[in-house]
Image: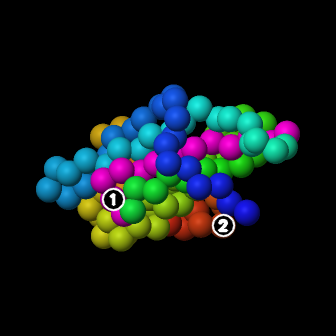
Amino acid sequence: MAMKLSSVGTVIVTRVLTRSKGKKVTVAIGKPRKFRNGSDYYCPFRIMGMGDEQVRYSGGVDTVQALQLALQQIGTRLYSSEEAKTGKLSWDGGSTKGDLGFPVPDVIRDLLPK
């Protein structure tokens, strides 16, 4: 059963992206924590300024894997969004137009800008 989170807790990193018309999209990633009943970890995150803004998380066997999987899940959500598909989402640090700076799983690598 999935946990329901209301907060990312202690924010360890953020990234600000720009939507069309100068609107901001902020990605906040929380400190990975241990699941209550188990030895695995989860890393909470929230994407604000686009969509439902629900706190989500990725789980892993340790804090590094939980963080890596959270970064991929964020990338998947961003690159598959309507904003990214229509070129209305950008990041100032991107090496090419549409590069948002987040990794994605290999199976959806075709969503990344060329």
Q: Which mark is residue 108?
A: none
Q: Residue 54: give x, y in percent of width and height.
A: 46, 56
Q: Nearer the viewer, residue 41 or 86?
A: 41
* Residue, disc 1: 50
What residue is drawn where x is 16% and y is 50%?
22
Amino acid at pointer 2: Val
Residue identified by numbered label 2: 107
- Can see residue 71? no
- Residue farthest to the right, as pictured: 39
Residue 23 left/right relative to 11: left
Which quadrant of the rendered structure holds the N terminus? bottom right
Left or right: 41, with 39 as reference point: left
| Magenta stretch prevailing secondary structure | strand
SS state under label 2: helix
Residue 87, position as x, y percentages in the image: 30, 64
Query: Local crowd at mark 1 within 10 Å, few (<14), some, or many (≥20)?
Result: some
Q: Is residue 18 above or below residue 113?
A: above
Quadrant of residue 93 within the rendered picture: top left
- In magenta, the rendered stretch is 39-51
* Residue 86 on image: x %, y %: 30, 70
* Position of the C terminus by quadrant: bottom left
Question: Where is residue 19, by image quadrant?
Answer: bottom left
At x 53%, y 60%, the residue is 76
Q: Amino acid at mark 1?
A: Met
* Residue in front for this viewpoint, 53 or 94: 53
| Label 2 crowd bin: few (<14), some (14–19), many (20+), radius 10 Å | few
Confirm whether the magenta stretch covers residue 6.
no
